[in-house]
Image (cartoon, helix red, strand yellow):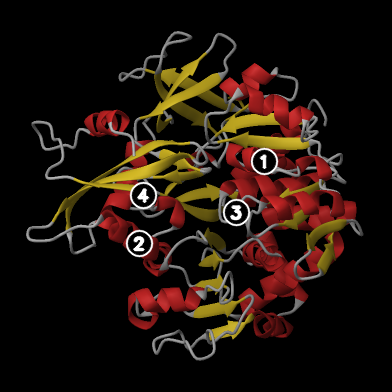
Amino acid sequence: MTDTPTRGDIEFGTIAHLVRTAAERHTDAEALVDVDAGCTWSFRDLAATIDTAARSYIASGIEPGDRVALWAPNIGEWVVAALGIHAAGGVLVTVNTRFKGREAAYVLRSSGAKALVTVTDFLDTDYLQLLAGAVDPATELPDLELTIVLRGAAGGTPGGTPDNAPDNAITWDEFLGRATSVDTATADARVEAVSPDDTSDLLFTSGTTGSPKGVETTHAQNLRAFRDWGDVVGLTAGDRYLVVNPFFHAFGYKAGILAALMAGATILPHAVFDAQAVLARIPRDRITMLPGPPTLYQTILATPDLDRHDLSSLRLAVTGAAAIPVELIVQMREQLHFETVITGYGLTEACGIATMCRHDDDPETIATTSGRAIPGVEVLVVDDDGNEMAPGEPGEVVIRGYNVMRGYFENPQATAEAIDDQGWLHTGDIGVMNDRGYLRITDRLKDMYVVGGFNAYPAEIEELILAHPSVAQVAVIGVPDDRMGEVGMAFAVPAPGEDLNPDELIAWCREEMANYKVPRHVRVVDALPLNATGKVLKFELREQAQAEPT
């Protein structure tokens, strides 16, 4: 780790140039190891495979600026597919692997995705079936021209393919075969045409309106942010990085793939977190870097036979997204053998990172704060009029700097509501700044709560639940949970003449939304508490939940 690293945006320019530079610097070192598939790519091999993918995208009609959606778990092909999109001049659109068909269709439609890259055999789930079961791709996704299946049958699961499954689906091997029709010079010209200030990705996030929005960030923004992130963490060449955080999220994609490439570290994707599987991999794969939400470490620490596993290779941990007991930081160092444990704070609209603790901070600082602003970024706590609060006084957290998003995709009104005329991004989070400039998040203006590291937005969940024919009104809040930190609790008013069963509603939700969004508790009520303007008084619901625990 250097004191004055070269800025990532200046050093690499674009993500495609990052891939090529990494191949020159780390040539035959392991860049990507997919244990489940038995595949290993050196940095040189990875760059060559990404180039093949880029030429295949070009051959398939992907033009600069076209959006390509990627809906797949953490597997080696995800890395190749995503970085190939960048090299072809396209824009990566990530899709949450927990999404159901209706949720994924919204992202595809809103982004105008021209192609979808997915799988049909992940955990007995066929994403094409999910999609086709929710919408008619031919009529409801008019921009979608091509579907590429990384793993599984391109036509869907044998015997179970819906009649309206896309007829333009091809396998990954068939897709890569198209590269032969595009020469190297054409691909090189496409790479050189990409500007550092071009949009690199759209990551969808939800807000209080309940409608997910595509956050636009650029190559330069992400390279600068996560070069600094890697430097603060101490990620170096030779580190072996087990990426459990989902690639569809900034934590897995940007703090995972991009940061590892910039440092020369080895990426080891892990598709589904299971404590025993991770504990087995640490000594076998010589893992040194293992980030994740606090629940990941708490689950590992609670494993009965923890002392039977050799964890001596571990040295770097990064966590956040929830309140952290000081004792957890101590246990991570003493029992899991981490040399460095760092916490941070960020949001998708700020490239995923805004503040970080430093490696030499004490355990209490690391556990009770989210660190201080990363270089080149301003973070303040302000009152309703935008005036900075004194240390120790709560207010809204605002962020200004190079990491603030370009905007919400094709949504100027929402962008203007989020970023004021002085360039401050209003996060909707309530925090307290201490006299050292370290931030502590204390509450959320937007009512968002965090389920095992995943942001859950009540307005979006409420909108989904209202599709149930027996629900007339619903309000969702976050309530404490020993294992997940927080989970959802729904207060539902039955439609006239309907008999609403809490267990049945929860089961219905499991079919209609990602698991982390599903309320774990449902209380059927005659009416919701409202103020004079008709707004639900959620503080009263929280008081009810606290007075009558589930």
How far is mark 3 from mark 4, CA to CA? 21 Å
Q: Which corner quadrant of the image does residue 27 belong to?
A: bottom right
Q: Quadrant of the C terminus?
A: top left
- What residue is at 81 percent from the left and 70 percent from the top? 38
Q: Sequence-wise, which precedes: disc 3 or disc 4?
A: 3
Mark found first going from the N terminus, 2 or 1? 1
Which one is nearer the viewer's eye here, 236 or 101?
101
In this view, the mark in front (2 or 1): 2
Q: Nearer the viewer, residue 185 or 108?
A: 108
Q: Secondary structure at mark 3?
A: loop
The residue identified by callout 1 is: 226
Residue at 52% x, 63% y is: 65
Nearer to us: label 3 or label 4: 4
Q: CA distance from mark 2 to mark 1?
A: 40 Å
Q: How far apart in space, not on screen, are marks 2 and 3 (Cα)?
A: 25 Å
Alpha-carbon distance for marks 3 and 1?
16 Å
In the image, is residue 439 above or below residue 300? above
